[in-house]
Image: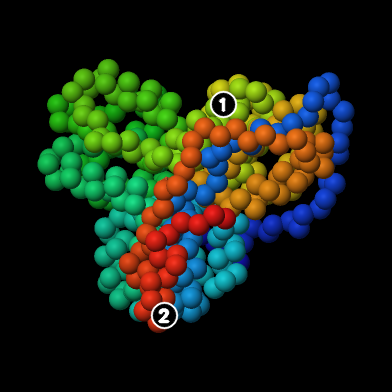
Amino acid sequence: MSHITNGALAIDLPTPRVPAVRNRLKDTPVAGRKRVLLAAPRGYCAGVDRAVIAVEKALEHYGAPVYVRKQIVHNVHVVATLEEQGAIFVDEVDEVPEGSHVVFSAHGVSPAVVQGAADRQLQAIDATCPLVTKVHREAVRFGGQGRHIILIGHAGHEEVEGTMGHAADRTTLVQNPGEVDDLVVDDTENLVWLSQTTLSVDETMETVRRLRERFPSIQNPPSDDICYATQNRQVAIKKVARESDLVIVVGSANSSNSVRLVEVALEHGAKAAYRVDYTSEIRQEWLDGVETVGVTSGASVPEVLVQEVLDDLADAGYGDVAEVKTAEEDLMFSLPKELRKDKSGAVDARGLGGRTR
Ligand code: SF4
């Protein structure tokens, strides 16, 4: 078992997945009709899909072990599965033997980490989500123009550390609307705000509103930093939550977008909302008197884990499942350049990234 940290959380890996036990949840009577509203989009986004495939292909290309700095994506099941295949997850590149292959996670890294890997002659494969790289480029550009960046995000999250590292002396972090009043910045006429990709859209807009009150000339980013996947999953769960007595979000505790889905569900009408890694964590008492259960999953969650939740809910009488779809997603990202061809030199069918899990 390895022990790695991700942002503020320390996690022991692998987290055991309790084998499915059918009929664990009892079918107790409720006043009305039992049903499930299944949010769509949910689960894997293009950036997560690309990053997970990158580790799998690195193992195919180079053989085990392949080292991965931090969790490749914030999901304990994905990480445990890759660990079984030969990936070794580490906190920092100085734990990787010199000359080895190391994959940088979807959350991105600072230039200092890239340099640290180069100093150890590591063969680095960058699985940073292109939408995180976009924010890095914005930070470099605005920092290079001498602007001061207000980054909205969560302290200690790897993505925030990576983004701040691209304009370290020109960035100030603000985590929520309540922190805006306490911000101390010198050049108040030269500000621009950027954000972490996986925040609550509504809370971020409130933070921006407060920033505008304090710093009327602050500039917006050129385009949304909160990514399409985060936004789409929040829109879908808002619609589901309005009709749900209970919302179950499948996702890990350190998955920012999963935790936000619980918050958004509670803010938009769900009477209760819980996050689970595995269906085995669903408690019978959560279902007391519940007619409608909303179900969704974070952007780093394989669909198989959602299906297991649906199976358990069906055992409890919630076999009537209606999908609530608010958007179609078909975005795919090409793999890191080192992995686009198979060992024979042919372009791998997965080289363009994206697949259904
Ligand atoms: S949640 Fe958004 S930013 Fe993060 S990996 Fe997925 S697409 Fe990229």
Q: Quadrant of the C terminus?
A: bottom right
On the rendered structure, is 333 left or right of 116? right
Q: Amino acid at mark 1?
A: Lys
SS at circle 2: loop
On the rendered structure, is 66 left or right of 357? left
* Residue at image coords 29%, 24%: 211
Please indicate, yes or no, whether residue 173 appears anywhere in the rendered image: no
Residue 6 position, x and y percent, is: 47, 52
Q: Quadrant of the N terminus?
A: bottom right
Nearest to N terminus: mark 1 or mark 2: 1
Q: Is residue 233 above or below residue 208?
A: below
Q: Is residue 222 above or below residue 62?
A: above
On the rendered structure, is 39 left or right of 320? left
* Residue at image coords 58%, 53%: 302
Q: Return the residue at label 1.
A: 239
Q: Is residue 47 above or below residue 102?
A: above
Res 317 quadrant in image:
top right
Q: Amino acid at mark 2?
A: Lys
Calculate the distance from the C-alpha at mark 1 to the C-alpha at mark 2.
46 Å
Residue 155 position, x and y percent, is: 40, 41
Res 172 quadrant in image:
top left
Q: Please tell me the numbered disc located at residue 343.
A: 2
